Image (spheres, rainbow, N blue to C red):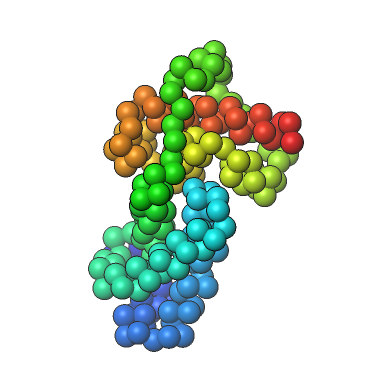
Amino acid sequence: MNNLYTVEEQELVRRCLRRDDRAQMRLYRKYVQAMYNTVVRMVPNKMDAEDIIQEVFVKVFQKMSEFRGESTLGAWIKRITVNTALNFIRQRKEIKFMENEEWDRSNLLKEDVKVDPEFSMKQVHHAIKKLPDGCRVVLNLYLLEGYQHQEIASILKITESTSKTQYRRGKQLLANQLRNG
């Protein structure tokens, strides 16, 4: 295994592989809140997000033997989390993308939208949850999860142009929501 994760995490993985209940609970507690925050930004329904998180950790413990240490443990769990949330969205066909014509193109030509640092993470998180489906998912994947538009397009089966448009639109709507309360 690579040394991208700590000795403590290596021991935690070894114990989880031996199906040590205390180690599994420790791993769950260490990562559940961060993973829940990731899911709820993409799937704003709290009950659905909670179901997805349970599915994520079932997968984590089932696939623990596949973890090779090529990334941090948290990054590996986050990849499972994002993929599980995206699968949920795809299965429910909940994601809707507005066509370019439905959005005022002049908004897309403006300078990059800046979000004032005076807003708390809670305010930003709440505003993100109110975004239309397509904007919310693309904004999360690009801005918060670090995916590139080409990857997003492939994952969501949309064009790269649609991904970029949804991202810009999402940023504009987010800024408007934060400014207008």
Nearer the observer, 173 or 94: 94
Q: Name the image quarter holding the N terminus.
A: bottom left
Residue 145: percent from the left, percent from the top?
44, 46
| Residue 77, quarter of the rendered image | bottom left
Residue placed furthest toward the top = 106
| Vertical side of 16 occupied by 47: above or below | above
| Residue 15, quarter of the rendered image | bottom left
Q: Name the image quarter holding the C terminus.
A: top right
* Left or right, residue 64 beside residue 27: left
Residue 111: percent from the left, percent from the top?
56, 19
Q: How many marks?
A: 0
| Vertical side of 99 occupied by 137: above or below | below
Residue 163: percent from the left, percent from the top?
40, 31
Residue shown at 25% from the left, 68% from the top: 66
Residue 154 seen in the current view: yes
Residue shown at 39% from the left, 44% from the top: 93
| Vertical side of 82 occupied by 112: above or below | above
Residue 35: percent from the left, percent from the top?
49, 60
Residue shown at 44% from the left, 44% from the top: 94
| Vertical side of 101 occupied by 140: above or below | below
Residue shown at 72% from the left, 31% from the top: 179
* Left or right, residue 175 beside residue 52: right
| Residue 13, quarter of the rendered image | bottom left
Residue 141 seen in the current view: no
